[in-house]
Amino acid sequence: MSNHANVYIRNERDEELEEYASRLAEKIQLTAAKYDENGEFPFEHFELLQKEGYFKLPIPKEYGGEGLSLYELILVQESLAKGSGSTALAVGWHLMAFFSLSCSRTWKEKDYKKLCQDAVHNGSLLNVFATERDSGNIARGNKPTTTARKVDGGFVISGRKAFATLAPYLKHFTVMAFIEDENRVAEFLIEKNESVNIIPTWNTLGMRSTGSDDVELNNVFVKKDALLAYADKLVINRFEAFSKAYSLLLPTVYLGVASAARDFIIHYAEKKYSPSLGNVISEAPHVKQKIGEIDMLLSVSRTLLYSLAEKWDENIDLRDKLKNEVSIAKYMVTNNAIKIVELAMSIAGGHSISKDFPLERYFRDVQCGLYNPPHNDMVISQIATSALEEYRKDQVALQHN
């Protein structure tokens, strides 16, 4: 992270974490373009992250992890994303899974403890596969078509999940499935075996090396205790609890990519000589204008993201009341990231679309933020609905006074 961001480093621990993540980012940056080009999963990046203890950052200290706060996770993820947006996004789902679990503790403690220790000691990652091509995004209220049928001793699970990030790397994962006998949705732990088929479908515009393939479950038998938790309105749902603050790690990745674009274009502008200007292009008024806009957008995004994370960390009583703020942060940060990269590209001109420069990769990667939940239209609808409900509630209160 550049010096311009040091205002968000509050203490010595923050500084150590930022230096740690920046060191990792410098290493993975060396091969980020290669994996973007071929779309292959960057196993070497994850071997490095495992070796350096990155997988245990969100895991509670009681189970051998580092127990990082939301603010601290955002700090390391922004720095890591400057090296590779894809790698940061992919490992981010693991961080989000364990952070949401550490807050909600909706699983049986023995199951949670086992998976925590597996991540700490064996480098096992975790992600939940929820989205399906048939039923669409469950964030919009769709019921999964993946089914769990009760049998003697457990369940038989069948279905196909899409956008299964980390699929090539994981040895186990969780899935959302509909239990036919109970008319309820639940989260199940699945171990990879011969009945689990990874289908290499991930071939996208951006975030090309996240390994977000399809996963096909062909009558996978699991024992009864593989049912980790129900996920409906009858119980505390870890995906919805505490204002979904864990999801702030998504816009953090796009902020990191935009920050990398900012650093690149300033270096480029300071080195690029213009004969017509008789100086480096950073001295051109229109270039200064764009650099100023870039840094203002970055500052606004960082202030929004980090201040919200700090508020969430330090105010337990507020954690259930920040849902709108979390959604707004996602909307603003991801949309600002796109604007930042576009401004950087406009400074570089035609060179910006060359594969020799990282800007075109940054441009493709930040577009993906629009398609991580919640989508723009969902955020706007949520905020509008809240505004109208608040107004109507106030009107009713006035009528009764």
Image: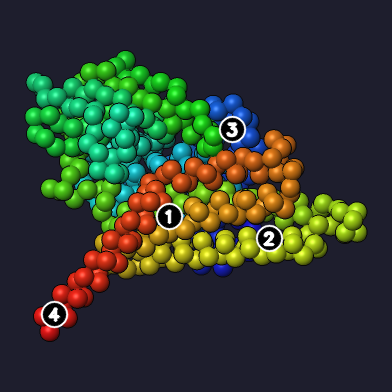
Name the residue beneath numbered marker 3.
Answer: 36
Above or below, comparing residue 77 to residue 225 in the picture: below
Circles 2 and 1, Cβ within 8 Å, touching? The answer is no
Q: Secondary structure at mark 3?
A: helix
N-terminal-most mark, 4 or 1: 1
The quarter in which the N terminus is drawn is: bottom right
Label 3 and label 2: CA atoms lie apart by 27 Å
The quarter in which the C terminus is drawn is: bottom left
Kind of residue indicated by mark 2: Lys
Label 3 and label 4: CA atoms lie apart by 60 Å
Label 4 and label 1: CA atoms lie apart by 37 Å
Name the residue beneath numbered marker 2.
Answer: 290
Kind of residue indicated by mark 1: Lys
Q: Nearer the viewer, mark 1 or mark 3?
A: 1
Label 1 and label 3: CA atoms lie apart by 24 Å
Q: Secondary structure at mark 1?
A: helix
N-terminal-most mark, 3 or 4: 3
Q: Is residue 307 left or right of residue 158?
A: right
Above or below, comparing residue 299 to residue 150 in the picture: below
Q: Nearer the viewer, mark 2 or mark 1?
A: 2
Name the residue beneath numbered marker 4.
Answer: 399
Camera-side residue of 302 and 392: 392
Q: Secondary structure at mark 2?
A: helix
N-terminal-most mark, 1 or 3: 3
Image location of residue 369, percent across then percent down? 47, 46
Name the residue beneath numbered marker 1.
Answer: 330
